[in-house]
Image: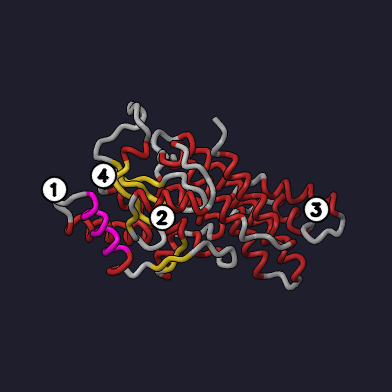
Amino acid sequence: MLETKEINALFTLIDDPDEEVYSTVSNRIIGFGKDIIPNLENLWENTLSEAVQSRIEMLIHSLHFTDLKQSFIDWRDSAYADLLTGALLVAKYQYPDLHTTPVLQDIEKIRRNVWLELNNYLTPLEQANVLSSIIYNYYNLKGGEVNYNNVDEFFIHKALESKKGNAISNGILYQIVCDKLDINAKIINIPKQMILAFYHKDLDLDKSKTSPQDKILFYVDGVNGQAYGHQDIDNYFKRISVPPVPAYFKPISNKRIIQVLLDETGKCFNTTSNLYKQTELTQLANILDEQ
């Protein structure tokens, strides 16, 4: 823990009823960075006042959030914004002390089990069947429609722990495994869905002059791994009365996927007491817009 007379003096003012004084004190404490968190945790444990404990909790949250914002900037500016890393950063908003090693180990187990079942003679649809069988049957991952009353379903580590995610977290997990196996399947921009498109092998959409939909072999639903054909998707667009323009069939970038995850997670925080979390998650999503 950090030990200075200034820190001790600041801690004696955390309970000051004057909001202007407290604002000055909190800003100074946050200025010390996350190294001061153990001091705050110790202070919390030795404080009887619930009001002061609440202020300490918000200070710790602010310190974690400041650190997380920098992590998102670093991820955004990295040469390859890895999807798994981005999903773990989102989880760290709610679980700042998250240990990522178990998550990486779980995903590696899934990747290896799928890899053992693959061979060069399988068609893309057969590959998808292997993926879905391992992820949804062997590992028993379940999925459902997005439920804003259960925020944990948005976090990849919680989906793996509980074997229960939603359309977004399951779809992200599916693409992560595909990426690790060099399978050309990507989440696409179909409205209100988290659908993966299996493209022709080695397709470069940036160089292709045809409609991206023409290069898609079939689709997989991230909720449960079910495969769909082109007619199924066409029927969906008719049902929602939306024209199926080419942009809907292009892969979404990893940054855009994480923006969607942040925005959708934020909708879980809609009460007066936690509305600030929705605002903060929107701030993180906006970081990914910046160049």
Q: Earlier in the sequence, mark 3 or mark 4?
A: 3
Crowd class of label 2 (few under 14; some 14 to 19; many from 20; radius 10 Å) = many
Cα distance in 3D space between marks 1 and 3: 64 Å
SS class of the residue under badge 2? helix
Query: Residue at 61% of width from left, 50% of height from top?
Result: 281
Q: Residue 32: x, y in percent?
A: 64, 46
Q: Residue type at mark 3? A: Tyr
Q: Which residue is mark 4?
A: 182
Query: Residue at 57% of width from left, 44% of height from top?
Result: 285
Mark 1 touches mark 4? (CB < 8 Å): no
* Front of the two marks 3 and 2: 2
Image disc number at residue 120: 1
SS class of the residue under badge 1? loop
Cα distance in 3D space between marks 3 and 4: 53 Å
Mark 3 touches mark 2? (CB < 8 Å): no
Q: Earlier in the sequence, mark 2 or mark 4?
A: 2
Q: Residue type at mark 2? A: Gly
Q: From which residue to which does the magenta span run?
A: 124-135
Q: Which residue is mark 2?
A: 171
Q: Which residue is mark 3?
A: 22
128 within the magenta span: yes
